[in-house]
Image: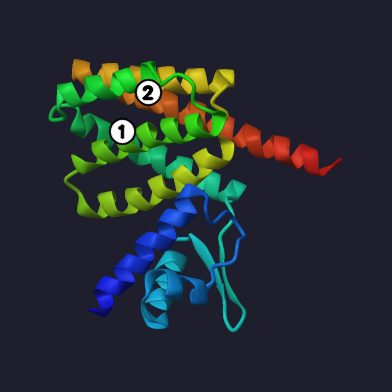
Amino acid sequence: MTSGKTDLAYAEIKKKILSGVLPPLSDISEDALQKELEISRTPIREAVQRLQKEGFVYIYPRKGTIVSEVTPDLVHEIYQMRELNEPAIACEACKRIQHDWLLIRRNAFANPPEGLTEQELIQYFIKYDSELHMSLLDYCNNRFLRNIMTIVYDHSQRLRIKTSRPTHKEQDNATQEHIDIIDALLSQDQERVRNAVLEHIRSSRKISIGYYKFQEILETF
């Protein structure tokens, strides 16, 4: 029973962190979560400890818990893990993933709905970006790799929320990169898949690093 409540608390807190409802360095109130989820303090604390191990929160004994920052070091670690593992994951998936499913996602990237606000467009692309990468991961037979890459992708989602600019040229490039990945998957050419995935990861890393360098410049003024 406690395990189920812990899983519930973990899922709800993590959802708030990944969506930006709980932004970096914001306080996590155990009292508020108890009232919202109608569960005791113990499963909430167990959930928070699990989130700490995964790097999503900082726990300060007798002081409280806050959401962790998205730091340049974290950015480096995210892209290091993605570059080492994601091409192989995609190559493994390309022989088995459903073509109809890919075509629907290709159309979603190529033709976003009209009339969305900038924030809605950010959420739209993040949704399909995350869905594509997580779906490829489902075809991975290595349980340990699936577990660790799920955490990596969750951190990557926080990074996308922080750095996404859907009306900028970089987003146009990112959209085309996802279309190129899907086209490569449809071709079932593993070398083409590997190259498309690597190009996207390296381009995305460049944007993320550029964002943090820009923030450092702003802080000097």
100 or 212, nearer to the observer: 100
Mark 1 → mark 2, Cα distance in angstroms: 9 Å
Q: Quadrant of residue 11?
A: bottom left
**Is mark 1 in CB contact (under 8 Å) with mark 2?**
yes
Label 1 vs 2, first from the N-terminus: 1
In the depicted view, which residue is nearer to us: 4 or 171? 4
Residue 191 seen by the camera: no
Which mark, by number, is residue 85? none
Q: Which residue corresponds to mark 2? A: 178
- The image shows residue 43 at horizontal and vertical percentages of 36, 77
Question: Mark 1 Cα within 10 Å, few/some/many (few <14, many 20+)?
Answer: some
- Left or right, residue 207 beside residue 156: right
Q: Residues within 10 Å of mark 2 (few under 14, many from 20)?
A: many
Horizontal side of residue 68 vs 213, given as left or right:
left
User: Relative to residue 31, is residue 15 depicted above or below?
Assistant: above
The percent position of residue 171, horizontal first and vertical second, equals 51, 23
Residue at (52, 49) in percent of width and height = 20
19, 69: nearer the viewer? 19
Q: Residue at left 57%, top 17%?
A: 169
Q: Is residue 170 above or below residue 208?
A: above
Quadrant holding the N terminus: bottom left
Q: Say which amino acid is labelled 2.
A: His
Residue to which mark 1 is pinned:
132
Residue at the image position 64 percent from the left and 35 percent from the top: 211
